[in-house]
Amino acid sequence: MVLNGFYQMEDGSFLAFFEEPEAPFDFKVQRDFDLYIALEVRADYLQDI
């Protein structure tokens, strides 16, 4: 089974996250920026939340 989530951005693009819990996993050495995401959010949007 694969778990996933899709999020539509205001510009029509999508952001997707996938997880496959039953797949084998090995820890490996990673740099800080290997697991990084950056999103731009308007200040007025944050104030409306």
Image: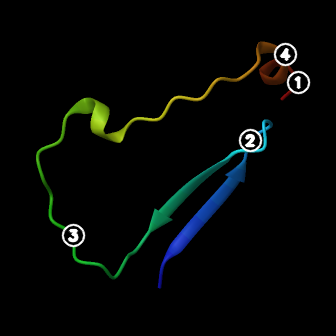
Q: Which residue is mark 4?
A: 44
Q: Secondary structure at mark 4?
A: helix
Cα separation, mark 2 vs mark 4, equals: 16 Å
Q: What residue type is disc 3 on? A: Phe
Relative height, residue 26 to residue 42 (above, below):
below
Residue in the image at 34% along x and 40% along y: 35
- Which class describes the residues within 10 Å of circle 1: few (<14), some (14-19), or many (20+)? few
**What numbered label is drawn on residue 9?**
2
**Residue that sits furthest to the right in the current view:** 48
Residue in the image at 59% along x and 29% along y: 39
Q: Secondary structure at mark 1?
A: helix
Label 1 or label 3, whichever comes before in sequence order:
3
Relative to 48, 24 lies left or right: left
Q: How is the image coloured?
A: rainbow
Q: What residue type is disc 1 on? A: Asp
| In-front residue for pair 15/26 | 15
Residue in the image at 78% along x and 44% along y: 12
Q: What residue type is disc 2 on? A: Met
